[in-house]
Image (tube, helix red, strand yellow):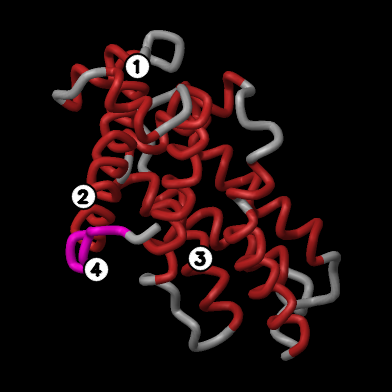
Amino acid sequence: MYSNSSPKDQNTASFIEKTRRAQIITCTIETIAALGLPKASLAQIASRAGITPGVILYYFAGKAELISAVAAHVFAEGEVFVRARMDTSSPRAALASFITGNAAYMAEHAASITALLAIRRAGTLPALMPEVTAGRRGAVQNILQTGQDKGAFRAFSVPVMATAIIGALDALVVVAATTPPIDFATAGAELAETFARATETTAP
């Protein structure tokens, strides 16, 4: 069986589908940030997007799949944001810019961070989180390992230190949600200084 659609038509359809999926994800983020996860129904999301719930179900199997797509989107967007701000002139500069870049993303994408926190608190992503966070963990572990190989960092367990750094960054989100307002720039700089001291080759 052959398709009557031309490659151009297929490319146009693919672009439209990607655009629509992106719109639905964006509106889902905004709805969760505004109403919380329990109240962010498909009807509420559809209303914000100016579509019907049926359109959402055309692109996503259900709310669970949509929420998973939101989490994956936030982490992918954050990775691109941080990479664009990385200073790779040295391992120490790379680590500092990784930390401050993550803090800057939190500051500039408040709705995304609020939605992600709501999703994580609901415990709806236990199986997916390792997959969607792999890029961030891999990036910081690579920085730490490179730093040790070049003698820029002291000897320590790379996985343990990476977990501490990621945990500290995630804690900023919790602090921002419970005791606002938070100055992410200052907090990011403080964390960068903390882990600069924690990884340095000589004792403070």
Image quarter of residue 141: bottom right
**Residue neighbourhood size for the residue with mark 3, other residues' Cα within 10 Å, grouped as few (<14), some (14–19), many (≥20):** many
Where, quadrant-wise, is the N terminus in this rendering?
Answer: bottom left
* Amino acid under disc 4: Pro
Disc number lying in front (3 or 1):
1
Image point (28%, 20%), residue name? 45
Picture layout, residue 149 above or below residue 39: below
Name the residue tied to disc 3: 98
Disc number lying in front (4 or 2):
4
Magenta residue span: 3-9
Image point (38%, 9%), residue name? 39
Which numbered circle lies on residue 7? 4
Relative horizontal placement of residue 16, taking residue 75 as reference (left or right): left
In the foreground, 8 or 68: 8
* Amino acid under disc 2: Ile
Which numbered circle lies on residue 16? 2
Alpha-carbon span between mark 2 and mark 3:
34 Å
Disc number lying in front (3 or 4):
4
